[in-house]
Amino acid sequence: MNSFFLFVLMTIALLIAVYLYRVLRGPTVFDRVLGLNGISTKAIILLVAIGTVYERVDMFVDISTGYALLNLVGSLAIAKYLEERGEAF
Amino acid sequence: MSLSELSEAARWVTTPVSIGLILVGLFFLFAAAVGVLRLPDVFTRSHAVSLTDSLGALFLLGGLALYQGFSTNLVKILIVLVLLYLLNPVIAHATVRAALRSGLKPWTREDA
């Protein structure tokens, strides 16, 4: 069972690499913001899965909740800033 | 029979179901990654990031929650899932609206 969760962790880490490519290459700045949003979604899932592997889900779930809220504030701030500035690409 | 004993007795059916849910969630996350890599512009890519990604997170976190058995951890993981479903559309909408208002033209078939 533990090796199954390690497989899940490895797959999600590889998918994060795909999103990282979009963040680095993305033609516009909005592609980068969307890529960061996808990476943070993966990070939330990754934290819960790591908690399942170490059998400390009660602790890791709290961290992932904080990460989700932090992601909301950061992404909304960037989106609002780019919207106000205009001509951002 | 207490709730924890009931949870232990139900483990032989909840564990395979949770493995199935996790595999379905991984498939959807893989589809979202392919979409992020292949789709042509921001507006189409936002579908992959917000819609398919959220569906994959639903299946994956649901499977991980079911694997915990009936306990506090299940409720906590479900709270994270609800939070994700509240926040992901907000972020995608704000980003795409910023892209549209800053003058980015959506991709059409003529651009291909």
Image (spheres, coloured by chain):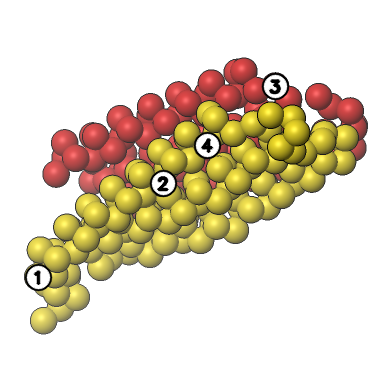
Chain colours: A red, B yellow
Sequence-wise, the earlier of marks 2 and 4 is: 2
Q: Quadrant of residue B18?
A: bottom left
Which type of secondary structure does the marked residue at label 3 adopt?
loop
Q: CA distance from mark 2 to mark 3?
A: 25 Å
**Where in the figure is residue A50, as x and y percent of width and height?**
31, 39
Residue picked out by circle 2: B28
Position of residue B28 in the picture relative to residue B71 (left or right) = right
Looking at numbered disc 1 in the image, what kind of residue is underneath it? Ala
Q: Chain of mark 4?
A: B
Q: CA distance from mark 2 to mark 4?
A: 10 Å
Local crowd at mark 4 within 10 Å, few (<14), some, or many (≥20)?
A: some
Looking at numbered disc 4 in the image, what kind of residue is underneath it? Gly
Residue picked out by circle 4: B35
Local crowd at mark 1 within 10 Å, few (<14), some, or many (≥20)?
A: few
Please tell me which residue lies in front, A50 or B110: B110
Q: Residue at x 55, y 51 (%)?
A: B51
